[in-house]
Amino acid sequence: MGLKAVRTADRDTLCAMAVQAAVQDGVDVNTRAEAAAESWLWVAVRDGLVETLRTLLVAGAEVDHVDDDGCTALYMAAVYGHLDALRALLVAGAEDGPCNQQRVHCAAFSSLPLSQCII
């Protein structure tokens, strides 16, 4: 495992622990940053933090949240090439529908049929 992968894994574990602590303190995991339309789920997907993503989903994060541009977390997982995040979202029930205003399907971005993305 390369240094970047180790750093990402460490960051993912720490973020997942922070999410668990926040949930225990009563924080709503669907809260969005004031400066952006990004939810915690969105940030985890964008950054490829799969452990954090799964923690958020278990804590009740909205799997099909749509940002101000009409994009879903499923769309972003495909765009960023985070196949493990894509799988986690599909297993959690993310809809395989239009992912943004241009009606681009996630499978087109990952170049895989969605049937191959489901565990």
Image (cartoon, rainbow, N blue to C red):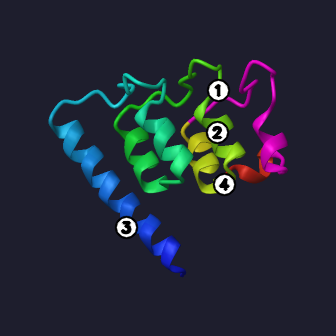
The kind of residue tagged 2 is: Met
- Structural crowding at the residue carrying mark 1, measured as other residues with C-alpha within 10 Å and reported as few (<14), some (14–19) or many (≥20): many
Q: Earlier in the sequence, mark 3 or mark 1?
A: 3
Q: Are marks 2 and 1 in contact (CB under 8 Å)?
A: yes
Viewer-nearest of discs 2 and 4: 2
Position in image of residue 9 (x %, y %): 43, 67
Q: Give the CA distance from mark 2 to mark 4.
A: 11 Å
* Residue located beneath label 1 in the image: 71
Instruction: State which tag comes first along the sequence, 4 or 1.
Output: 1
Bounds of the magenta segment: 93-113
Return the residue at label 2: 76
Question: What's the CA distance linking mark 3 and mark 1?
Answer: 28 Å
Task: Say whether marks 3 and 2 touch (CB < 8 Å).
Answer: no
Q: Residue at x 45, y 46 (%)?
A: 53
Indicate whether 11 appears above or below 88.
below
For marks 4 and 1, give the one nearer the viewer.
Answer: 1
In this figure, which residue is indicated by the disc labeled 3?
Answer: 10
Q: Earlier in the sequence, mark 2 or mark 1?
A: 1
Label 4 sits on what residue type? Leu
**Residue found at the very far front of the displayed protein:** 35
Q: Which mark is residue 83?
A: 4
Q: Residue at x 51, y 72 (%)?
A: 4
Q: CA distance from mark 4 to mark 1?
A: 17 Å
* Rendering coords of residue 38 (x, y %): 47, 30
Can you tell which mark lies on residue 25? Answer: none
Mark 3: give few (<14), some (14-19) or many (20+) Cα within 10 Å: few
The residues tagged by marks 4 and 3 sit, at their Cα atoms, a distance apart of 19 Å
Q: Is residue 82 left or right of residue 104?
A: left
Q: Amino acid at mark 1?
A: Cys
